[in-house]
């Protein structure tokens, strides 16, 4: 039934647990895993003359390197389990859109993703990429906590 599983990852402990479950899910269904990590660009734009700005290029290089390292960990786990794998790193301010676009591009049947389960003010101010994916996709989404 499920042949192409999209697995967003951010390298968190919860994402690692989701990876383990996604691999077992893929084994049961004879599916492949497409994992995506969204590197978010440098968030600061100086608004005042003379503002001290950290080197955005260094920041973005480090973020991209970290995102690739997260994908490499998923790739290694899939290789160990014998699950076909494809990794994707993208740079975007809107991770949920990249997740949905990747699911469409790779003909995914399901999105399997972790949710940090934020509540209260943290949920209000930080938002939830998982919630945004749920609200904007028509694919089944398996949410793990």
Image (tube, rainbow, N blue to C red):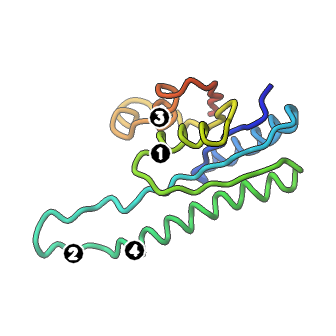
Q: Position of residue 104 (x, y in %)?
A: 59, 37
Q: Which mark is residue 95?
A: 1
Q: Would residue 16 be found to the left or right of residue 98 on screen?
A: right
Residue at point 39%, 50% (across, down): 93
Residue at point 70%, 61% (across, down): 72
Q: Would residue 106 be found to the left or right of residue 124 on screen?
A: right
Q: How far apart are marks 1 and 3 (CA)?
A: 17 Å
Residue at point 79%, 34% (across, down): 3
Report which residue position mark 3 lands on.
Answer: 118
Residue at point 61%, 26% (across, down): 139
Q: Quadrant of residue 116?
A: top right
Label 4: few (<14), some (14–19) or many (≥20) C-alpha neighbours in 10 Å? few
Secondary structure type for disc 4: helix
Label 2: few (<14), some (14–19) or many (≥20) C-alpha neighbours in 10 Å? few
Report which residue position mark 4 lands on.
Answer: 57
Label 3: few (<14), some (14–19) or many (≥20) C-alpha neighbours in 10 Å? few
Report which residue position mark 2 lands on.
Answer: 52
Secondary structure type for disc 3: loop
The image quadrant where one finds the C terminus is top right
Of residues 47 and 20, which is closer to you in this image?
47
Q: How far apart are marks 3 and 4 (CA)?
A: 31 Å
């Amino acid at each position: 039934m499920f042949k192409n599983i999209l697995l967003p990852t951010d390298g968190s402990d919860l994402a690692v647990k989701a990876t383990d479950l996604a691999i077992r899910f893929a084994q049961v269904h004879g599916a492949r895993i497409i994992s995506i990590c969204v590197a978010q660009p440098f968030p600061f734009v100086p608004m005042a003359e003379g503002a001290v700005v950290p080197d955005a290029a260094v920041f973005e290089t480090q973020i991209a390197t970290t995102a690739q390292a997260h994908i490499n960990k998923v790739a290694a786990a899939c290789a160990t389990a014998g699950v076909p794998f494809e990794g994707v790193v993208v740079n975007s301010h809107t991770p949920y859109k990249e997740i949905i676009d990747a699911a469409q591009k790779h003909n995914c049947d399901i999105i399997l993703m972790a949710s940090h389960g934020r509540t209260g003010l943290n949920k209000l101010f930080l938002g939830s990429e998982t919630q945004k994916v749920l609200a904007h996709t028509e694919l089944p989404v398996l949410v793990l906590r």
